[in-house]
Image (spheres, rainbow, N blue to C red):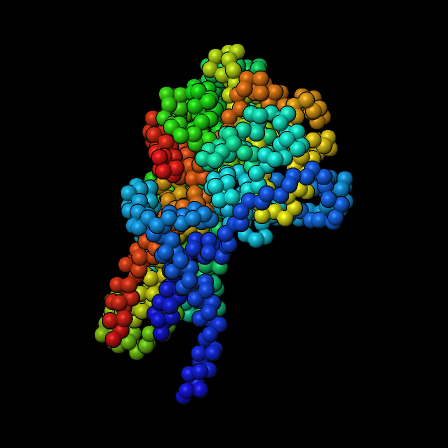
Amino acid sequence: MKRNNLLGALISMPAVLIYSLFVIYPLISAFRYSFTSWDGIGAKEFVGLANYIQIFQSPELVASIKNSLSLIVFFSVFPIFFGLLLANFIVRIRTQKIRSITQVILFFPQILPLAASGIAWSWMYAKNGLVNQFLTAVGLEKFAQSWLAGFSTALPAVGIIGAWVLTGFCAVLLATGISKIDSSLYEAARIDGANWWSEFRNVTIPGLRQEISVLITVTTIAALSSFDIIYVTTLGGPGSSTLVPGISIYRLAFTQSSVGLASAFGILLMVIVLIAIVPIQFYSRRSDQ
Amino acid sequence: MLSKLNVSKVGLKLIALGSVAALAVSLISLPTAANAESVATTLTKNKITLVIADETGFPLTDKLAEEFTKQHPNVKFKINRDSFANLTANSPRLLASNNAPDLIRLPTIGDTVKNKLLLNLDPYVKAYGWDKWSAAQLSGLRVNSKNVRGSGNLYQLGLGYSITGVFMNLNHAKTLGITAPPESLAEFEADLAKAKAANILPIMAGDKDGVVNFAVQALINTYGDRQKLSDWIYNVPGATYNTPGAIKGADKIREWADKGYFPEDINAIDYFTFITRFQNGEGLFEFNGNWEAANVQAKLGANSKFFLFPSLNKGGKHVAMGAANSFSVPAKSKNKTAIVYFLNWIHTNAAARQITLDVTGATPGGDPKTALPKVAAGSLIEDGLKMAAQLSKDNGYIDFMANATAGIYANAIIPQSQLLVGSKITGKDFVTAVQESYAKELGR
């Protein structure tokens, strides 16, 4: 037994070392920097909670937090909702080959680099892009506009890109979950005269609780920590209408050399993410027991 | 099992996220004190390799290095390129690292002088006779002991000195009956109105990455006081952006936006999109710099013109942005004498000066008495040289307001100008917001 423990410790040692060096140590450093005024090179000056206070006093930084919270609707709610519908559709496909092809197509946006997707979508959203061509073709040309340039349309437009990226991922994971649900439960429901909706509500959804909780967690983090899609499509503009904490932290640390303030915002973002996901995890685990 | 697995992944991602900046700054060492080696002006006979950190897409350093090696075969070059954004974001850490390059493209000095990361070039000024060069051209490359630009020791030199103005599509001008570049703001506005009435886009511009500010500053230069704005850009204590000239200039941009003189989707158009669209014939005017002269010439040929943005009244003095394509020698460079020799050679050697002009369209700087490189008669590059001469005569050079502080462009100028051209705020709002951001960043 003792030998096994020693062996286990030895095997995990490289991972523990790498994790400590690249994750734990920088995290502790970031926490320490967050209480200093530091340009990243020169002397650090201890400023207490001043950086944290400055974040809440800056309308722009607060706006970036609000924007990322709005993105949860697009990154979490839409993908999980449509993912459920698609998963239900996928498991009903009887031919294995067609089912696999459908899953691959749906999963495809996950494989593409987000920066490439962002560029492709910004072309589609342009004044002469596909979206406006479609609107014009169906007689809705009065709604045609440059979607990423509008102050009220830019955030939903980047949100839709996120929804597009994550819906397939959700659908594939949920379809796998559905296929694991005991088929006798469906048979019993059918014998009781349950229709499609009743089956979906009373058998499928409860059977997918774990998967849904994981998806809410993953997609919420994707929303709150979004960076690449926005960096490529709007850089946080127009104005600050699509500014998110990821972009603000990058600018503070690397453009403005305010490493202390950037670290404080990073730590704060981590706390916000934890506040959002810990209750979900807690609830999900409690219902498992 | 599934949820446990993901929680650990989630934890990983969270922690990684909160610590990216920390990692980047914790893996570097602090700089040593600036060197005090004696200044030599001779090139070593030993075989050496000079390392240059430059941005992607600007082949000037490649061409200059090639020519220098041809003239001095013992000197080879290694040029590391990164995107402008990455290079500027990483430059302080690159300068502080133990493998700092010998020369680095450094658009913003920021705290690098304060942190003793750059070589003071002042000892070389006398040694090489750079005191005969245009003082105005070099002033923006100096930093004093209070970390204020514009005076003090010399920390940078330019690989070409740019100048900004307005490109005009002569095909459209002909259609509109415009026979010559406007000579006053009123004439410029009359041309804009003519274009709009004829359904030709008056100004091709983009503001996704803030470049409409070439136009914003051109107007502020016209309405405002050059010295006051220059002081503000150089962070002179007490200087403010909040001046009647700046407000008037910003208000004029708002007026142009309201009149539809810019593209409707300006806030979604980035730099490369708008220059391409202008070169493909869209728009009567484009605010840009002489670094695009060769590209515009290649596409529009003789159907283009480059001129200084007009003064308020006909015959008035011009003010325009011009800046060095600035490079610095890191304090940690291991080949200081050789790299400064290379910098001097770029400004003085006839072949090097020709390369600078041919590749960038920018003036090579150096002693104004030195013969200018050859240029095709009637070309846009020739226009640029004439503009530079005019601007020197008018003492009208001014730095870009985006260079005022490291964060001013991303934090205030870009988002606020997007609101301005989106007709959401007034000139006063724009100026106030930019000044607030400036004061906050400089702790004033």
User: Considering depth in this image, is A190 or A280 the residue closer to the camera?
Assistant: A280
| Quarter of the figure that contains the N terminus of chain B | bottom left
Camera-nearest residue between B334 and B224: B334
Residue shown at 36%/57% (left/top)? Answer: A31
Q: Disc count in the image?
A: 0
Vertical comparison of A127 with A165: above or below? above
**View extreme (bottom): residue:** A1
Q: Where is residue B111 in the image (x, y as percent from the top left)?
A: 47, 41
Left or right, B188 with reference to B420: right
Residue B302 in which image quadrant: top right
Instruction: Identify the residue at image location x=64%, y=25%.
Output: B132
Residue A263, given in percent of the width and then of the height, sits at 38, 52
Visible residue check, residue A201: yes
Residue in the picture at 67% in, 32% down: B128
Of B115 and B219, the residue lying toward us: B115
> In x, y percent, where is residue B21?
43, 53
Q: Can you say which quadrant of the picture contains the C terminus of chain B?
A: top left
Q: Where is residue B10 in the image (x, y as percent from the top left)?
A: 37, 64
Which of the 4 quarters of the picture holds residue B383? top right
> From the viewer's perspective, is residue B184 above or below residue A211?
above
Name the residue: 56% across, 37% down: B155
Q: Is residue B279 visible?
A: no
